[in-house]
Image (tube, helix red, strand yellow):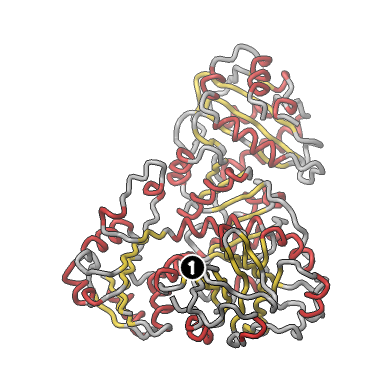
Amino acid sequence: MHIVVVGAGEVGYYVAERLSNEQHDVVVVDVEAHRLEYVAAHLDVAVVEGSGTSAAVLERAGIQRAGLLLAVTNVDEVNLVCCMSARGTMGMVRVARVSNPDFYGDARNLKPDLFGVDVLINPERELALETVRLLQSTAATDIAVFAGGAVQLLGFTVPEQAPVAGRRLADIAAEEGDRALLAVALERDGRTIVPSGATEIRPQDHVYLAAKAEEIPRALELLGYEPSSVKRVMITGGSTEAFYLAEFLPQHGVQTTLLIADRARAQELAERLDRVLILHGDATDVELLELEGVGGVDGFVALSEEDDTNILASLVAKQAGARQVITLVNKKDYIPLARRIGLDAAVSPRLSAANAILSYVRRGSVTRVATFKGCDAEAIAFEVSAESPLVGRRLADVGFPDGAIVAAIIRGTEVTVPRGKDGLQPGDTAIVFALPDAVATVSALFPS
Amino acid sequence: MQLKDFFSPEAVTLNLQGKEKDEILKELIGLLKLDEKSEAVLYKMLKRRENLGSTGIGRGIAIPHCRSLVVSRLRVAFGRKPEGVDFRAIDDKPVYNFFLIVAPPLEVSNQYLPVLGKIAQFAKEPDVPERLQQLNSPGEFLELLGEKSL
């Protein structure tokens, strides 16, 4: 597919990278020549310098033959106008990144169709929602939810004393009987593998589990983590992500403190957030964090716009005794680093954006895609059609491609984490966990 | 435990005398009836906290707070300054109502954050700033806290 990406910032770069790796024909448009130089030097994509709001520039980017326009600059208005300018192309899906909370209020004063926008994506809001879910499932490093949360894919690091450490998956499965839990991937020594029954779980492995929501406490127990509830959370930073999170948490009954270094921003948010204690102060000040009682919080979330501020504040919070620490990390290279230095989980605006966008790229039978920070694998939700060669056979007999596994089957309101004896029916949604090499083979098994 | 159970009428004053930030902090500390040395230590701690960022949270309310060994359990006080004082609050407006919270550094019951949160929640109730201005006695202050049942 020919795809035009407007905006070569963190989000645009990452999305262009993912799409070009999948053999799409990608053109990146940006007003800044230096950003385009970087993109051209690192990615196999074409670049066009100029404003994506200009019809002439979009034409140079080949908009007339594009199947998808992704307007993902960090300025909402630019993205909207960009979609307006591209209204002429028939059959093209126009996606605009829109982050301003004002556009998402009760008033809903933004009418996407007025701008010719087919899909609005809001990475900041997605990131805040992901953070809420991470806080709710203590110790998880990654989380993706399907079927409205009924089935979840969670990443965990296996601690030394985990009850499952040193045991084979087949043995654990036999003991757990029909529990709706499945290990779908293991990351070990920097490599991701889809395990078999003979695979042994080792301490320090990073394991990805598919689980029905009600089995998550059992999953935590098997891994040696204490299930616990979140009552108090401290957020640092005045970013849009912080705003959304501070809005969501009190709705879950969580007492929330927001610490903001910028006075004017602190005041602005204090006026808009009714149920949050907003304090003005520097999140990297060790003394301030201690005075604010960071050691007593269940969750500490560093959401400023600066990676180094976030990492530093998170380290201080962890040291002081905050139970779970979640850190916003923009720079790709810092994400594995965050885990290595002992921070519990990293969230990334790029990945949140990519998750929102990739679902619209793989149209056809794909209904949703989730990516993970720790590994390259993806979780893809496929609609199962009558034409699928998988229909009517046991999964054990199908010979599913290497590097891929069916993590869950959604049938109406029923969710199953499948065993070999289970099979797919037309109308099911299959959640498949797949390594990059297997994506194409797996997709072929789910014709639309 | 409800918020009102942490306050006693002796630790409530509706007529703070101080005309600037430091004087107000000293008066609030005075409400806790500590010895002179402890008062001095606490004053220094609270000043340091204010220097890291004002505890004036807007809407005429400030919550000076810190942890210190000078108290053996969580202590709170309330003071009102009807004329208002410049407290470098985040909205740059004068502060009329002050909630002081002091907790020991290692507190078994871990009430510091819940109390801080409850006071913040109380302060955010739309009618609270006006109701605080209308109080005539410490008893009425406790009644108002009780009414909000936080």
Q: Quadrant of the N terminus of chain A?
A: bottom left
- Tell me if residue A335 can be seen: no
Tell me where residue A25 sits by quadrant: bottom left
Residue A38 to residue A353: above or below: below
Q: Position of residue A181 (x, y in %)?
A: 71, 69
**Residue name at image x 62 percent, y 87 percent:** A399
User: Is A310 left or right of A125, judged from the image as shown?
Assistant: right
- Spot the residue most to the top: B136
**Residue name at image x 68 percent, y 22 percent:** B146
User: Is B126 left or right of B100, judged from the image as shown?
Assistant: left
Q: Nearer the viewer, residue A414 or A282?
A: A414
Q: Nearer the viewer, residue A277 or A263?
A: A277
User: Is A7 left or right of A445, judged from the image as shown?
Assistant: left
User: Is A173 left or right of A1, judged from the image as shown?
Assistant: right
Q: Which chain is indicated by disc 1?
A: A
Q: Position of residue A359 (x, y in %)?
A: 44, 69
- Spot the residue most to the left: A56
- Tell me if residue A100 can be seen: yes
Badge 1 marks a residue whose secondary structure is: strand
Tell me where residue A157 sits by quadrant: bottom right
Q: Nearer the viewer, residue A282 or A402?
A: A402
* Disc 1 residue type (three-letter): Arg
Q: Nearer the viewer, residue B48 or B128?
A: B128
Residues packed near mark 1 inside 10 Å, few (<14), some (14 to 19) or many (20 plus): many
Pointer 1 residue: A368
